[in-house]
Amino acid sequence: MKRSEEREQAFILVFEKSFKEDSMREIIEQSRENYDKELSEFAVSVSKDIIVNLPILDELIEKNSRGWKKDRLPKVTLAILRLALYEMIYLEDIPISVSINEAVELAKKFATENDASFINGILGSIAKRIEGGD
């Protein structure tokens, strides 16, 4: 399975969590029962870690979403941002530019062109700080 497919699985799991009170473990088990493909270990691991690190990720989203509160963002956009930020901060083997590009592609597939631009802007701003050591 390609990394982009694994990333899409992780996105779907994180997106589902935004609608459910179930634990991520329960969501993963439900997805395993209902999904036509095997869930990758990458998707499972990343989705669990995103939920654990939600306060840090959401704080970054809030700080960099000029004029937008996290709660006003579409759930699709929020899930994509959480996934990309997690990769940018915690997965050193994935170049930041790849995480941003993949997030934009997810937005084009699951959201709108405006969401893709918004996501690109926020992630680009954060990437400058990460790469600059701020």
Image (cartoon, rainbow, N blue to C red):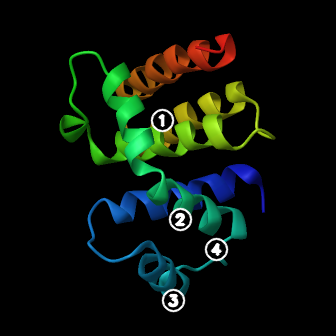
Q: Is residue 22 left or right of residue 52?
A: left
Q: Nearer the viewer, mark 4 or mark 2?
A: 2
Q: Can you identify the residue that label 3 sits on?
A: 33
**Mark 3 packing: few (<14 Cα in 10 Å), some, or many (20+)?**
few
Q: Residue at x 44, y 72 (%)?
A: 24
Residue occupying the point 48% across, 84% down: 34
Amino acid type indicated by mark 4: Leu
Is residue 112 visible to the viewer in this orientation of the structure?
no
- Identified by mark 1, the residue type is Lys
Residue 67 lies, in percent from the top left, at: 21, 17
Count neighbours of disc 2 (C-alpha within 10 A) and say few if under 14, some if 14 to 19, many if 20 or more.
some
SS for dot 3: helix
Q: Bin the neighbour count of mark 4 within 10 Å (Cα to Cα): few under 14, some 14-19, many 20 and up.
A: some
- Label 2 and label 1: CA atoms lie apart by 24 Å
Q: Which mark is residue 121?
A: none
Is mark 4 in CB contact (under 8 Å) with mark 3? no
Q: Which residue is mark 2?
A: 48
Answer with mark 4 or mark 3, whichever residue precedes in sequence.
Answer: 3
